[in-house]
Amino acid sequence: MSPLDAFRIALRAIFANRLRSALTSLGLVIGVSSVIVLIAVGQGTQRGVTDQIRGLGTDLIFIESSAAATTSQTGGLGGLAQSTLVQGDAIAIADDAIPGVVSVAAQIAVDAQAVAGSNNVGAEIVGTSSTYAEVRDLGIGSGTFITPLHDEDGSLVAALGARVADTLYPGLDPVGQEVRLSFAGGRITFPFIVVGVLDEQGGASEANDQVFVPLSGVAGRLRFLYTPTGDLRVTQIDIQTASGADEQRVKDEVSELLLFLHETPEPDFVIQSQDDLISAATEVSNTLSILLGSIAGISLLVGGIGVMNIMLVSVTERTREIGIRRAVGATAGDIVKQFVTEALTLSLFGGVVGIAIGIGASLAVDGRELGGQEMTTLIQPWSIAMAFLVAAGVGFASGSYPAYRATTVDPIAALRNE
Amino acid sequence: MIRLHEVTRVYATGETAVHALAGVSLEIGRGEFVAIMGQSGSGKSTLMNIIGLLDRPSSGEYGFGGRDVAQLSEDARARLRGSAFGFVFQSYNLLARMTALEQVELPLIYQGAPDRKRRAAEALVRVGLQDRITHLPTELSGGEQQRVAIARSLVVNPLVLLADEPTGALDTATGHELMTLFSELVEQQGLTVVLVTHEAEVAAYAKRTVRMRDGRIIEDSGSPVTAAAAGGPAP
C-alpha cells in the first residue's frame, strides 16, 4: 500500500467522524498553540527586560549599597539614609584613573510628587550630576540637561523626562516654568525651575518618568543625607566604561578601592555590569519560559492521550473493517500503516491549526495591556518546530499501540461478527 | 491444486479442547466447483478458513499449488491470500460509505496494482453490475451487495473463490441467480469455487459435494476420502 493510499484511507476515516476527529484534534490544537503562545510571552518578557537594561546606556557598571539594595525598593528617604555609598566614592573612582573608566555619576533616587499648577504626577527624582546624560545616553529635546555650572552652584533646576513633561505641561514648553517637588509625603517641598526636557526614550526606558535635578542642589537642602563625617550619601554610582574595556577588571579595581575607602573587609556594596543584570534577568525569564513551556507541554501530552484514546476506540469499533481488509490481502503492516497514518494525520492537522492559532494569538496579544502590564511576545521559530515535532511524535506514539492492537484482530471472528 | 492431508484444528476453550477438524484429507483440482455441506458445527467453515489461509491447521499438511503453505509467515500468507483467494461471505462484508467501485478496488490497493479503476470496473461488469458502479452499499439490494463482494474477490483474478453460505441472506430467486453466476464463472472462466452451505438446493449447482460431520468428511461425491490421491484433476 502506497503512503498516498494510506493517507486517502486515513482522510476517509477522519471525515467519516467529523465531530469526533475535530474534538480529538482540539486537544492538540490547544496544546500546540499554548506552547507557542506561552513561549512567545516568556521570550517577549525576556526581550522587554533586556531591552530595558540595555536602554540604560552602554557599557555601564552600577554600584549600589548592599543595605540600600534591600531597602531602596521603598523609594523612600529612609532607605537612602542607610546607604553606605557616598558621593566621595564616586569622586575617588573618577580620580583614581582606573583604566577603562570613562565617566562616573553618583545619584540619589527618591520617589516624589511633581506638581505644576493644578497638574501633578508621581515621578522618581534623580539627584545627579551633569555627567549623567552622557553616561546614560540621554538625548535632550528642548533646553539643556543639568550643566556643570549647576553642579557647582547647587541651583534648584530640573530636567524633565518626556512623559512627566507631557503630564505637567500639556501642550506647553516647560522650559523656564516652575515645578514643585514634594518629598516624604509632602512634608518637604522645593520649587525648581525647569531647564530642559528629555527626548522620548525607547519604550522600556524609565527615564521618561524621571525628573533630574543637581545632586548638589538637593543635598544642600537635605542635611540628614550627610554622614557624620560630612559626606553625602547616594543611592547608586554609575560608571561608564570604554567600549571593549575589560569590565571584570574594572569591577575588581573599583571593588578594591571601595573596600579601602569604606575600611571594611567584606563589601558593603554590590557591583554589577549591564551584562550581569542581563544574564540575571535572562536566567529568571528562562526559568519562566521553561515553567510556562512545561505547563503547555502537559496540555500537549493530554491532547496526545486523547488521540490515543480515540484511536483505541476506533480500532475496537472497526474490527469488522479490519477483518475485511485482512481478508482482501492487507498485511499486518498495512493495518499498522493505516492506523498510524490516521493518528498522524489527526495530530498533524491539530498541530498545524495549533501553530496558526498560536502565531495569531501571539501577534494579537503583542503590545496589549494586560493587568496594567504591556505584553510583549516574541514568536520563536524553534518553539513552532518543536510543537510540530511533538505533535508528530504524539501522533506516531498514540497511533502505534492502537495500530498494534488492530493487527491482533482475528479476521475470521471479525468477518463473522455481524 | 489444493491438497489437505490429515488436517486438524483444535480450539482450546477453557478446560476442554474442541476439535473443529479431526483429521481432514481433501484434494480439490483447478476448475472444480465443490460444495462442502454439513450441519452447523460440522467444521465446514473452519475447513474453508484453513483453505483460504485465514486460519492455520493445528496439525497436518496443506499444500497449495504444490507448495507447503501451512508454515508460511503471516505476511506471506496475507500476500498469497490476497492474490490467490477470493472470499464471499453470508454477510456481504462490504465497507460502509464506499462506492461499489471503491469496494472492488480495495484488494488492488493492497497489491499495489496499477490501473485499479479500470480493473475494478471490469470486475463489476463481470458480475452484471455495470449500472451500479457509483452506488453505496445502502443503495444496493442484498443480491447486488453480494455481487459487489464477488466482484471484489474476482478483481485480483484469484485461483480459488471461497464462498461461505453466500445465499444465506438472499431470497430464493436471487440465490439461484447468484449460483448461476458461480456456475458461469467456473464453466466459462475456469475459476475454482469452494462453496460452504447447508442447503442441498444450493449445493446442487456444484459438480462435487463433500459432506462433513463432527470435523470429519463422511461423504465425497467426487473423490472418496480413502482414495484422495486418485480423485480430481492434478494441480
Image (cartoon, rainbow, N blue to C red):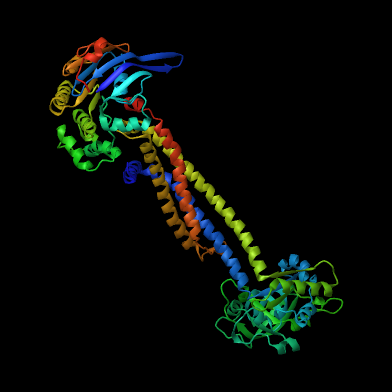
Q: Report if residue B218 is visible in the image.
A: no
Point 26% across, 38% down: residue: B108
What percent of the width, then of the height, locates residue A368? 51, 65
Q: Nearer the viewer, residue B152 or A201?
A: B152
Q: Is residue A375 above or below residue B202?
A: below
State whether residue B179 is above or below residue A123.
above
Find residue A118 and report its horizontal and vertical position in percent: 62, 79
Q: Quadrant of residue A217?
A: bottom right
Q: Nearer the viewer, residue B8 or A144?
A: B8
- Image position of A181 (left or right of B86): right
Q: Nearer the viewer, residue A328 or A380?
A: A328
Q: Position of residue A215 (x, y in %)?
A: 74, 81
Q: Is A392 situated left or right of B205 in this image?
A: right
Q: Count up the numbered dots.
A: 0
Which image quarter: residue A2? top left
Write the residue at 18% across / 27% down.
B191
In this view of the protein, can residue B73 be seen by the observer? yes
Q: Quadrant of residue A262?
A: bottom right
- Identified at 57% across, 84% down, the residue is A172
Quadrant location, the C terminus of chain A: top left
Which quadrant of the figure contains the N terminus of chain A?
A: top left
Above or below: residue B168 compared with residue A266? above
* Residue B54 screen position, x and y as percent: 33, 26
